Amino acid sequence: MKKLALLMLEIKAIMGNSAVVLTMFAGVIFYSFLYPLPYANQTPREQNISIVNLDKSQASYQLERMVDATPQITVVQRDYSIKAAEEALLTHRNNGISGISGILVIPEHFYKDLLLGKSPVLAYAGDASFFLVYGTIIEGLANAGSTLAAKTKVSHLLTQGLPVDYAGDHVSSVKLNMKPTFNPGMGYIHYVVPAVFVLILQQTLAMAAGLMGGTQKSGHGYWRQYSSGQVFAVRSITLVGIYVFLSLYYFGVGFEMYGINRLADIPTMLAILMPFLLSTCFIGIWLGAILPRRELVTFVVLISSMPLIFSAGVIWPLEIIPSPIIWLSSLFPSTPAIQAFVAANQMGATLYQIMDKLLLLWGLTFLWGVVAFISFKRSNESD
């Protein structure tokens, strides 16, 4: 009965703490809508460019029309000099509101080089600081250029008396049959959002647990009337229990809203979820115990978000991350949890295939559990 009474007191304390409630419920739900919003269209389309046509031949105007017809690009203006186009691009770069995102330069003698069988060089300039925009424009220009090149080559083969079917089949020695795996839409929602959802769960849970500890560092409430072990255990069970339901919201409703793959079964998801939430909760309890003010918990957790997401091996490949950074990031449950969740849920990996991540998560659960309990006991029993 004493444990049940402690559980009710803990739930009452959590629900009565506005900072904790705002972090857990409002934060998780708010970010489930806010973060994927910029990637709602998956990939950018209709990027504005300017064309500088120095050739002014029929073939160059045909290339202009083909570029404008691609789904990636919209030709919004034509400049008569490279300098004028550069000024338009720089104006867009500086104000970031309207204008063009790239320039295509069709060189002089473009049509002449085509007739002579030479390979004319198309020049492109763009703002490469926006990878998605830059890559989209390059893709559109490459598609238009390769299509015109194929048409020209077919025409040459036909003038040599070759059949149309033969010319069409031999326009290129290499044929691509691209089939995207695990990300059929080639968009950022399938690529980034599953990993970031895991990080959001970790950061908000750590903040909630830390804020609870920070709030109760002073005073003589119920947490002083029970043993540190009892309060530690009940708090961990309560917060993890709440976050099991919040996690189901992310991996269920959240994934359904954005059409994200869900290949893992429920036992596999729970097998990853439990050590992940437990170790995360222990980190939050540890932060609440060692930091002098509860506001510092939010600060510490927030500044760690960017390093953790970029060192998890999903957004930035592990192969090009220095080994010391990988070892350091592996001390936090988000790193193996992101890798395990993405592998199981988006790529269909089995428990056996992610067993190394599960063992690491349980190891972190034990490590952070010991550290958190020692720190919590010292803080809770101090006057």
Image (spheres, rainbow, N blue to C red):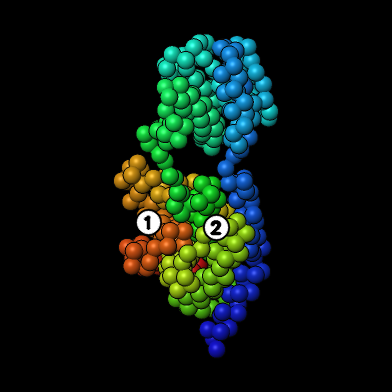
375 vs 367, nearest the viewer: 367
Q: What residue did someone put label 2 on?
A: 260
Q: Quadrant of residue 350?
A: bottom left
**In this rendering, is residue 104 above or below 263?**
above
Quick one: label 1, few (<14), some, or many (20+) residues within 10 Å? some
Q: Position of residue 363 (x, y in %)?
A: 34, 65
Circle 1 sits on which residue?
A: 331
Name which residue type carries label 1.
Leu
**Residue at screen point 62% across, 29% down:** 68
The disc, 2 or 1, on the residue closer to the chain's N-terminal end is: 2
- Say which mark, if any, is on residue 68: none
Helix, strand or loop under label 1: loop
In which quadrant will I find the N terminus? Answer: bottom right
Q: Position of residue 62 (x, y in %)?
A: 59, 22
The answer to which of 10 and 261 lies nearer the viewer is 261
- Mark nearer the viewer, 2 or 1: 2
Q: From what the image shows, is residue 121 above or below residue 132?
A: above
Give 346 or 298, whichever is nearer the viewer. Answer: 346
Residue density around tag 2, few if under 14, some if 14–19, many if 20 or more, within 10 Å: some
SS at mark 2?
loop
Q: Residue at x 62, y 26 (%)?
A: 65
Q: Amino acid at mark 2?
A: Ile
At 60% from the left edge and 62% from the top edge, which residue is drawn?
256
Residue 264 visible in the shown view: yes
Spatial distance from mark 2 to mark 1, Cα to Cα? 28 Å
Q: Residue at x 35, y 41 (%)?
A: 320
The correct choice, above or below, for 51 with respect to 238 in the image is above
Q: Position of residue 322 (x, y in %)?
A: 33, 42
The relative height of residue 302 versus residue 70 in the rendered view (above or below) is below
Q: Position of residue 314 (x, y in %)?
A: 43, 49
